[in-house]
Amino acid sequence: MSHFGIFASLAFVLEALTTQPAPPPGESRARAGAPPVTAIAFAQDGRSAVLGSQDGIEQIAWPDLARGRRLGSPMPAVNDLRFSPRGDVLAAGGGVPGEVGAVVALAWPGGETLWRMTIPGDVVHAVAWSPDGSRVACAGHDGKVMLLDASAGRPKHTLEGHSRPVYAVLFTPDGVELVSAGGDGSLRVWSASTGKLLTVLENHTGPVRALATSSRFPGSDGPGGPFIASTGDDGTVRLWQPRIGRLVRFVRLPSAPLALDWSSDGSRIVAAGKDGRLRALDPSTIDVVGDAPAIDGWAHAVLVDPSSRFALVGGEHGAIVSVQLSPAPKEKT
Amino acid sequence: MTSTRTFCTPFAPAALVLLWVITLGGSAGAQDRAGAPGAAPEKAPKVFSGPQKGEKLSALKVVGVYDELAGEEIDFVGEVGDKPALIIFVHKLTRPSLGLTRMLTDYAVENWKGKLEPRIVWLDKDRSGAESYLTRARSSLNLKAPVGISLDGEEGPGAYGLNRNVALTILVARSRTVTANNALIQPSDTEAPQILAEAAAAAGEKAPTAEQLAKYNAMRMSDRGAARPARGTERGAEDPKLVGLLRRMIQKENQPEDVKKIAAEIEKHLEANEASRRDLGQRCRSVVDSKIYAEGGYGTDAAREQLKKWAKIYGGGGTKEDEAKKARI
């Protein structure tokens, strides 16, 4: 792998035990000076994904990672991309640091702009769709979380309480709560319907950079969901039961992760960060069950594909790499 | 650190029962988490720390401290196996946290030998510092249960999900499954009857009543008293409730309203107790005249001010410094 500018499809097998096929090799080319990939989202057609960066939004084929069309640059820096639950709208969050934040909704697959919401002051770090697709939440560097009406982008609630920038936001899988996290080291759990603060989770000892959620927890004797995973500068990945305000368990990783995702089957949490490695965790034990190099430099984005078999990692020099995950152990009956 | 205890006289049971009822009735309120900036949650949430009732215990690797376990790497959970266990994680070393730890583990060692396995887990990532302290302070800590150091620090092993904001996490387990969990921010001896009842249930033993526990403690204190001269002998009989309340009042983490509340409790306790008023006066007098007080010791500013006030009311006069000022005037 060349040090500068790699856009590659490399299949790293996290554990030798797997027999699942890796994606076929894709296009590989140097992109010297390319900005880092900061956001990834899988389209519902199962054949494509979108990448966000300071170059705007780019569509790629999945699983071969072949480059597709460029959707242009709805904002100078794209920090997050999320498809609506029906897959017909793509929300992008970003802006110009220190100047303005923006959330843009694009029709999918057409790419037309449906609405744009600008937030004066600073960038939007993250966006999230409510499970019913009626609302979009955005997390701002100004320390605020905004709930927008997804049909027109009109603000419905502004949630204030974080004392530092908010880096991550998501809805619990049943849509009852909204969880935000940020530079003040806290996770805040809000009522998604009223915007009232329900609880504050304060065990992290540094800024919290990423969140992931799951309604499932493998193993018949595990605690009840929904669950949140969080990670940040303290190098830990922590599992929570946000509804009761409980830290369930945590693990300390050798390098601070910047991105996190939870597979849709609930069996794996993946984390990637400053050392460019991808680590897979078993949520029922919080043990690291896989560890492989992914990006030459910082990894800024990670996402598990809908089949829960692969993770897509994006990072420095526009690099994007797919990593095969080991099969999850069978659940106890 | 001294190891004087509360609940050590025959007069304690009534107070203990009352405090126990108050504690059980109001435990949720007593376990409020630290405040957060900005908007506050609507209700004080329950504080969690460690695996909850019904959840399995994973391996608990520690470094042994005393006797044949010294320096050995042990898995406390694997070693105890399916036997009933009382596992106490010490996140913060305070007088109340040490007092409760000692009371619970001593009771288990002396009354349920072979039926319940008590273990103390010291949470400290500095192995040599922890070993050195625990060895140096062994006689004053006076812990009878096996002690191990978890080198994961104040949050303990990640698989346990311990909350570093509490002082003690106390688990009762049987067959490696948690049967009771207590996460205590401000531990006190008043928690002991409830926790021992949970431990007794796991061990298949009869739980001590509050009165039996008070008698047991009185016996322990008199045993310890025989071993060394009792503190406060010159003051006559020690009032254990007063001592306990004073200890609570001088905790560094107390807010001014906590100090006010405990001070009011002490004043109420003094109302019908002439001996305790004298005891308080003498204690406060010796405290405010001490070097530690002069250097800013004995709790928060609010607590120090309250001690000075009582020294004047019940102990006669102000501090030595005040007296010196008067003399100059």
Image: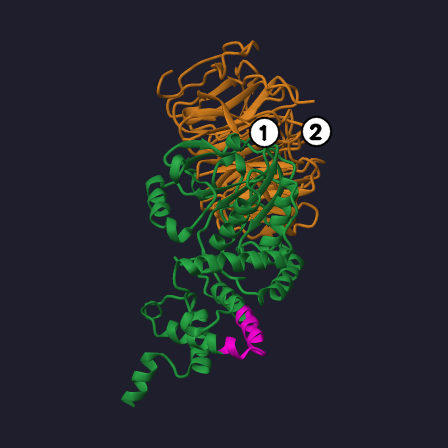
Chain colours: A orange, B green
The percent coordinates of residue B294 (x first, y second) are: 33, 71
B37 left or right of B175? left
Q: Quadrant of residue B14?
A: bottom right
- Residue at far left of view: B328
Q: Chain of mark 2?
A: A
Indicate the quadrant containing the N terminus of chain B: top left, top right, bottom left or bottom right. bottom left
Asked whether B271 falls inside the magenta stretch, the response is yes
Q: Chain of mark 1?
A: A
The percent coordinates of residue B274 (x first, y second) are: 53, 79
The percent coordinates of residue A99 (x first, y second) are: 47, 46
Seen in the picture, residue B167 relative to A110 is either above or below; the reply is below
Number of on-image labels = 2
Of the pair B150 and A130, the residue shown nearer to us? B150
Give amino acid for label 1: Ser
Give amino acid for label 2: Arg
Q: Is residue A57 visible?
A: no
Of the pair B325 and B203, the residue shown nearer to us? B203
Which residue is pictured at 48% across the width and 71% down the height? B237
The percent coordinates of residue A294 (x first, y second) are: 44, 21
> Circle 1: is it few (<14), some (14-19), or many (20+) Cα within 10 Å?
some
B206 left or right of A202? right
Residue at numbered disc 1: A284
**Residues under numbered marks 2 and 1 in contact, where contact means CB atoms less than 8 Å apart:** no
Seen in the picture, residue A323 relative to B42 is either above or below; the reply is above
First in sequence, mark 2 or 1: give its number.
2
Of the pair B146 and A270, the residue shown nearer to us? B146
Stretch in magenta: B261-277
Residue at numbered disc 2: A86
B115 left or right of B76? right
CA separation in Å, label 2 and label 1: 30 Å
Which residue is pictured at 38% across the width and 15% down the height? A1
Secondary structure beneath dot 2 equals: loop
